[in-house]
Image: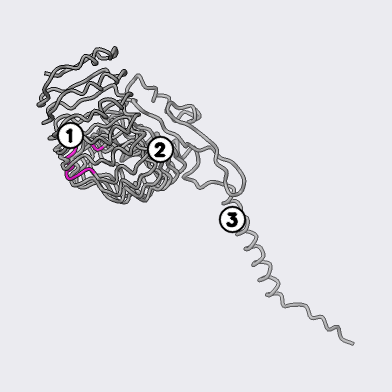
Amino acid sequence: MANSTVPPPLHRLVLSSALLLLLLLLASRQAGGRATPRRGTWLRSQARALLRWKSSVTYSSKHQLGTWSDDGIYPCNWTGITCGDTRSRGGTTAKVIPGISLGGAGLVGQLDPLRFQSLPYLVNLDLSNNFHLSGAIPPGISSLSMLSSLNFSGDQLGGQIPESICNLARLTHIDLSSNNLTGQIPPALANLSRLVFLYMNGNRLSGNIPWHLGQLQNIRKMELSYNILSGQIPSSLTNLTNLYYLGLSGNRLSGPIPEALGQVQNLQELYLHKNNLDGTNPPSLGNLTMLKVMHIYINQLTGPIQGELARISSLTELDFSENRLTGSIPSSVAGNLTSLTFFSVWSYLLSGSIPPEFGKLVNLEKLYLTENFIAGTVPPSLGNISSLRQIAIN
């Protein structure tokens, strides 16, 4: 009887063996790819990117940037560089650079030659107080997808804030203060849902404050002072329930102070001075019971000083100077704010007499009531304030 098993043709055996070898080769390469970081993430590659940038700038001899050299010295020993480990999908670890801190290094140059795409593991970037670091912020900064803290304060950076910075979803801290930045504040900053601190003061930013900033639910400190911002204070900012510091002074803001600002109950410092704000100071500000500093001087506010302010027992500084407020100083404000160290209402249209309740402000150091229509005598109770160092009542 003939054998029923027929050997497969030779060409099928060859094809099957070749296919098996190909699959093994692909699997090997894929596994190797998981175990090894991409070429751009090697510590050596990151070091080379920094050395290329170093060759484009000059720096202060007092700052030991001279430790950055390509002579085999481990880059984690370079001044201002922090190293860490990252684990690949294959389970192996590799050294990366998560931190660059070159504040006050006397850098002279620009950011363009710095290849941000070669530094994908960067978490903290501090190039602050380099007074001759100029040029624009490169759009390529969006390559720093791990970045949490960005500090370019005290430099000479110019141009507009790139929209691409709004793609850095892990950012919690942005400090671009004291530069020469122009243009508008990008509304897309609202995408940075983890943002806690935002500093853009001391630039030449213009246009309206984007209402979108009211979506930054985790923001605690927002400082936009001393720019050329115009328009009204967006009522959406009153949604920022975690905000404890709001700085909008030294701009060209107009319109009323939002009544709903009294809902930001964690607010501790409020700076609205040197604008063109008008209308009355809202009674709702008396709801800010955690407030310590309220500076609203040099505006166009009218109406009386609201007695509701007497509820803010934590207040240490109150300055309404150079507005158009009328009426008298409420005795409740003069007597209940026992934490006050500074009280100024000079250059008003205030009338009436000096409330004797001022004598209860045992922590008061400076009292300015000049250039008003206040009449009568100086209350003897002011002599009870042993901490009083300056007083102006002429």
Q: Residue at x 56, y 40 (%)?
A: 94
Residue type marked 1: Lys
| Residue 368 tag number | none
- Asked if the magenta segment contains residue 22, the reply would be no
> How are the colours assigned in the image?
one colour
Specify whether 334 is left or right of 394.
right
Magenta extent? 248-257
Coordinates of residue 7 in the picture (x, y in percent): 78, 78
Coordinates of residue 222 in the picture (x, y in percent): 32, 39
Please tell me whether residue 243 is drawn above or below residue 78 in the rendered image.
below
Residue picked out by circle 3? 30
Residue picked out by circle 2? 149
Q: Nearer the viewer, mark 3 or mark 1?
A: 1
Closer-to-camera residue (134/204): 204
Q: Residue at x 37, y 22 (%)?
A: 63
Residue type marked 3: Gln
Residue picked out by circle 1? 274
Residue type marked 2: Ser
Q: Residue at x 66, y 71 (%)?
A: 15
Location of the N terminus (image quadrant): bottom right
Specify whether 352 is left or right of 160.
left
Labelled pair 3, 1 in contact (Cβ < 8 Å): no
Q: Residues within 10 Å of mark 1 (few under 14, many from 20)?
A: many
Which badge, 3 or 1, is on the more N-terminal residue? 3
Location of the C terminus (image quadrant): top left
